Amino acid sequence: MTSQTRVLRSDDPGLQALEREGWVVVARSWGARRDTATCDRQHLEALAGRANATGTVRALTTHDVGAVLALDADTAADYPGREATAHAPLTADRAAVGPSRRAHGVVEADGRLVAMTFVDVEPPRAEVDFTVVAQDRRGLGLATAVKAASVLALVDDGVAVVRTGGSADNPAILAANRALGFVVDEEWLTLEGPETAGR
Ligand SMILES: CC(C)(COP(=O)(O)OP(=O)(O)OC[C@H]1O[C@@H](n2cnc3c(N)ncnc32)[C@H](O)[C@@H]1OP(=O)(O)O)[C@@H](O)C(=O)NCCC(=O)NCCS
């Protein structure tokens, strides 16, 4: 037996019909927006500064690709949620940075990369791809710090709107985004269909 999945906005008019057919909600996710015009620079700098107790928060460059791939491999199984918030393991291409793909990280004194956030940029908009922290460095404010540094750089680049998203089962990234001034403006549902005989 197999079953299909679909991802719909929570206000999708087709939702009730699917539920009558036996589709059930198996995961919830959200999208959030930050208008940079209202950013308080000093507040963001203070949040970015929380990384100083651990290491240096800085923009990642092409020289960091090896460390990015290593941290990604170590944390690939840690993303909560289902299809809507799945994280595909990075390829060398997606680990590389450039004008349309920016990244910030926290690097410890010995060179270890322990946190990173990647953003796809198409001015005047930018969309966070993912944010991740090494398992043994969570709860130290590092996700908030790298995202704060990233938003500050986007402000400097003239980006007007930054979007991000994630699983409803991820309270830490929700709290980080709230601290950074992101406002949740979309809710998404992942539905699983009734089981059908597979081929
Ligand atoms: C989500 C993740 C990036 C958070 O990183 P982190 O460095 O531990 O986050 P921070 O320390 O900046 O914490 C952010 C906020 O969440 C809160 N928090 C941390 N862990 C939490 C938990 N398990 N439950 C509830 N709140 C939590 C913190 O208290 C903090 O709030 P505060 O500033 O009000 O105190 C990290 O857990 C991770 O890498 N997870 C796997 C990848 C992932 O899910 N990425 C996000 C989707 S792209």
Image (cartoon, helix red, strand yellow):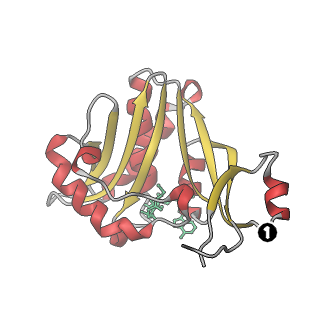
For the C terminus, give its image quadrant: bottom right
Q: Secondary structure at mark 1?
A: loop
Q: Residue at x 39, y 24 (%)?
A: 156
- Quadrant housing the N terminus: bottom right
To which quarter of the image does residue 78 belong?
bottom left
Residue at 30% over, 60% down: 72
Side of 65 where 165 appears, left or right? right
Q: Outermost residue, bottom direction?
A: 1
Residue at the (81%, 64%) spot, across then down: 21
Visible residue check, residue 157 = yes
Foreground residue among 13 and 119: 13
Relative to 197, say whether 11 is above or below.
Answer: above
Q: Position of residue 63 (x, y in %)?
A: 14, 44
Find disc 1 in the rendering and name its residue.
22
Question: 108 or 135: which is nearer to us?
Answer: 135
Q: Is residue 165 above or below residue 168?
A: above
Q: Position of residue 2 (x, y in %)?
A: 59, 74
Residue 137 visible in image: no
Q: Amino acid at mark 1?
A: Gly
Crowdedness near tag 1: few (<14), some (14–19) or many (≥20) residues, C-alpha within 10 Å: some
Going by the image, does 112 lie left or right of 195?
Answer: left
User: Where is residue 165 drawn, in percent x and y?
Assistant: 56, 49
Residue at 69%, 51% (x, y): give it: 8
Up/down of 1 relative to 147, above or below: below
Determine whether 173 is above or below 102 in the image. below
